[in-house]
Amino acid sequence: HNDKPTAIASSDEQPTRSSSSGTPALATPTASASSPVLTTTTATTTTTASAATNIALHTTTLTPSKNTKKRKLKKKQKDPAIYALRHKIQMCAKHDDLPTALDHYERATSTSSGNTPIELEPQTYYTLLGLCDGTLCKHVEPADNGTARDANEPPSKRTKLHIGTPRHRSESSESNDETTTPPPKIAPISLEERCRHALHLKSQMDLHKIHMHETAYSSLLRTICKMPNCDMDQAEFILNEAENYLTKHHQKRKLRLYACLLHAYAARGNLTRLVVVWKRVLGQTLSLTEPEYAAVMRCATMVGNSDCMRVALSDLAEEVSVPSHDTIKAIRNWFMSEHCGKVENSSKDGDAAELPPMSDLDRPLLGPVINDTSPSKLPFTISPACTLDPLTGILTSGCLKGHALSPCPLSPSSLHTLQQMNETIVLQGNVPQHADNPYQGGKKGKKKDLNEPMISRRETQWQHFNNWIQQANNNFTIVIDAANVGYYQCNFGTAPKHVDYHQIHWMAKHFVNLGHKVLLVLHQRHFHPNLMPSWAHAVVDQWCTDAERKSDSGIYLYRAHTGTNDDCYWLHAALSCGFGEGGADEVDATKRDSTRRCLVLTNDEMRDHHFQMLSQRQFLRWKERHQIHFKFGDWETVPPDTSGRVIRRRI
């Protein structure tokens, strides 16, 4: 407070920088006439001329920064009005305010009163199309009177599809939002007006030669198909235009591009055109989701086509594990209708031959959907909320109480397809259709670049593994991912780097005692002398590596070669042994045991295999019905072994 200057550097600090040229340092231990210090006062900040000179001298002697690359300037500066218009329309999209957005658009493109029209960006057109569709805020839906629902409608009255754990907001935050930023009042716009505006935007984009991407085409088609009396020929024309554009520019198609037409045909009961769209979806290697299957079943019930109902119901069972209430209602409506009691289809619309071929999709049938033997008006008895014994699969309530559910195993052709894909991934690194994707999937990083010597070495190793499996007669019933078992609960700080060989042996002996023939697949590195402890030799010696010799312990071991992925080996072993003694190459179908299954013990979710497979639905079905998850319980004391030591093991 006495306005005395105060030095920044303390008196006990050492010089932080020295100079051979005699230039004073930036911070010195004491102030002197030859090396003045930077001083400040409480009232104003003052700097002496000599101090400023010294600081400037030191600035010039410092080493320049390595990052001397200049920032590249944009070659073309856009009109600020374009950015302003984009911001206004985006703010309208935030509140689903289509009238205000259209008003901004008309003012920007108007030529009246000598105004110069603004050249809109493609993104602005895409946003306007999304507003016409009414899906930007995820709650605009057609109302019963043919108009879109009001954006100011309370959330409790809106129909939303929620997936995942809901995030509950506090009452205080909701009250603050309502008081500070109330949503604007928006006048409802009818579906006809939305469709008219969307088509106008499409014509303007064609006039200015602005291309539409897949999202814009989907928004336009949804807007058209929402109208009760929409022009389906016009929708088909736009769909063909979208397919041609996406094919020309090598862009992928999505289900949403076709789903709006499928729902529109289902609402009109036009099963013939619905099946055509269904085939177009399958032709793009896409599959329907639950809402589309429910629409197909409602259409089949409307026209009384039992073949279409049977195909849709079988596909639904493969795609959806737990159906929604709307889907259950669609299924019940069929079995409660008069059509399920007739032998022949009562529909003249939708020939059964037009349906997707069942052999190509390899879908298991769930049984008949018609019953002409019942004298009652309702051919089927429906028992809701039936209970089931998960261990035996026997129903414990309902009209079929005491009956067991029958399994739906994969066909030999499906197993053979999965086996060939896995072999292609091992030998070539990926299937040809996924060659452009550099990642393996499952958070396992990028794919390895394979050269000719590596491919030749992999082929030799893979052939050795196939011969080893054939020598064992392909009769393993349990294949264990030994690394996954050995590393179970071994990720703590002081854990050893090697696997727990005892855990692997205990798990294998558990299944041997149950009467299974067990195969362990473990990578070669786990047997390296620098990694494998000396005490583990006594455990590993009990695992037989000779497929032709009978194992005394009933446990067989295959060591995956260096440079290979051991996951592909145990997956291939499980697929091969699932065919029985003939293997996957058995021509005689009578020698294949269709009821036999080879199970895999692993907690690995196999996301990388699912990512790289083409027949993902078949792989998920196989994984669901062949994978065994495991966990270890508490330690227990067992009788002493031959060495006299008491062994503790997990169960």
Image: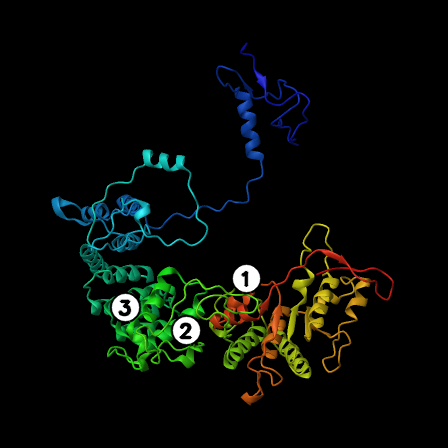
- Please state which amino acid type lies under the numbered disc 2: Ser
Q: What colouring method underlies this structural image?
A: rainbow
Between the C-alphas of marks 3 and 1, the distance is 38 Å
Mark 3 touches mark 1? (CB < 8 Å): no
Q: Residue at x 33, y 60 (%)?
A: 215
CA separation in Å, label 2 and label 3: 18 Å
Q: Of 103 and 187, which appears nearest the observer?
A: 187
Q: Is residue 284 visible?
A: no
Query: Mark 3 against mark 1, which lies toward the viewer?
Result: 3
- Mark 1 or mark 3, which is nearer the start of the sequence? 3
Instruction: Determine whether the residue tagged by mark 2 lies in a helix, strand or loop.
Output: helix
Question: Label 2: which residue?
Answer: 314
Q: Amino acid at mark 1?
A: Gly
Query: Where residue 9 sits: x, y (%)?
Result: 62, 23
Q: As shown in the figure, which amino acid type bears the numbered disc 3?
A: Ala
Q: Secondary structure at mark 3?
A: helix
Residue 442 image label:
1
Q: Which residue is mark 3?
A: 266
